[in-house]
Image: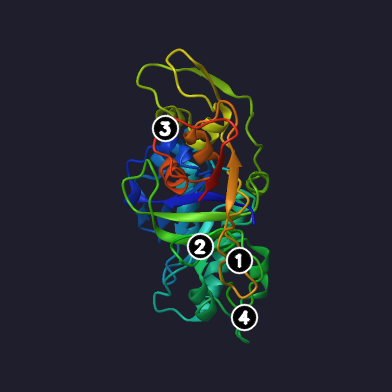
Amino acid sequence: MTTVSGIDVSYWDAGIDWPKVRAAGQRFMFAKATEGVTYKDPTFDDNWFGAKSAGLLRGAYHFFRCNVDAKKQADYFIDYVKSVKDDGELPPALDLETNDGMTREKIVAGAKVWLDRVEAAFGRKPIIYSGQYFLQDYFVVKGGGPPPWAKDYPLWLAQYPYQYVEGMKPTLPRGWFSYAIWQYSDKGRVNGINAAVDMNLFNGTLEELYKFAGASIPDQTPKTHAVAKGDSFESIANAYGVTVRELVMANPQLLNVGDKLTVPVAIAIPQESGSTSETESGGVEAPSKRTYIVKAGDTLSFIAVKHNTTVAAIASANDIKNINSIKAGQVLTIP
């Protein structure tokens, strides 16, 4: 199962270092723009342009108040997003998570008014964001299922195991048969953000994410970086918005002052073979044991990044006393 990592942010995540966020592997973001007809998120434009400068795909979302006029809410959202003169790449999103004491009929009708008006303004189908139980309890029509038109909108589903294991999938609400994005935690930690943040996975490849956004994948021509005193793989990766793994894979040698490093363009991170997978019963299989034959020029740091583990874990599994002393031909167990 291929996925792409992203986050969604608001005022509570203020002061974000966006290059570090991208270096942590995040490739898209949604920023809160408005709520009801009285609240505009004051960090929206900072997040909007900060994420753009770091190369993340961006979408804006509106927190819907079911007891407030839907047309006015749509216009409030449209005016605020249009005021920054940059619509972003991802479709706008309608956040449905509180009923505000309204009936199902009013919630469904109000949501459709907002969706139609925002689609007309931005020229694309908005995303519906909600949780499994809200959709099953409140976003339904007579007969118990979602309105027939709901299938025309991408679903961004909130459902929290908090920790993602490769192969996991969310449980879809009754009457829904696919999802575009899964918000799997509201307590994530990402380098560059000094607060808990919502964690998301796009259901597809990086190429499919760019197609979903109606954007072109950026130029993949790598840059070069001259290593300076005090540089580390982490500091260089953060400066260029790539992951440490991507940087090490392109430059397996140890860092020396004056070296010219190849800095790749950030791409989605594929899962390694041997990672956990979902069983037919819905459980999670233990990963199979892996081995790696050391090649000339390899370092434990390079091997650890390549196999999505740590130097300490490899050293412990192979009883290595000196982490700087491995030999070509040596067979390592990869935990």
Residue placed under numbered mark 4 in the picture: 145
Q: Amino acid at mark 3?
A: Glu
Disc 2 and disc 4: Cα gap in Å?
25 Å
Q: Earlier in the sequence, mark 2 or mark 4?
A: 2
Query: Is the N terminus in the top left, top right, bottom left or bottom right quadrant?
Result: bottom right
Q: Residues within 10 Å of mark 4 (few under 14, many from 20)?
A: some
Which badge, 4 or 1, comes first in the chain's sequence? 4
Cα–Cα gap, marks 2 and 3? 47 Å
Name the mark nearer the viewer: 4 or 1: 1
Residue bearing mark 1? 278
Amino acid under disc 4:
Gly
| Closer mark to the observer between disc 3 and disc 4 | 3
Cα distance between the residues tagged 1 and 3: 32 Å
Mark 2 vs 4: CB contact within 8 A: no
Secondary structure of residue under mark 2: helix
Q: Is residue 3 above or below residue 158?
A: above
Kindly state the secondary structure of the residue where label 1 is placed.
loop
Mark 1 vs 3, N-terminal side: 3
Residue on which disc 3 sits = 234
Q: Residue furthest bottom?
A: 143
Q: Crowding near pointer 2: few (<14 within 10 Å), some, many (20+)?
A: some
Q: Earlier in the sequence, mark 3 or mark 4?
A: 4
Residue 68 quadrant: bottom left
Q: Are marks 2 and 1 in contact (CB under 8 Å)?
A: no
Give the x, y percent position of residue 285.
58, 65
Residue 251: percent from left, percent from top: 55, 26
Label 3: state its secondary structure: helix
Quadrant in which residue 172 is drawn: bottom right
* Helix, strand or loop under label 4: loop
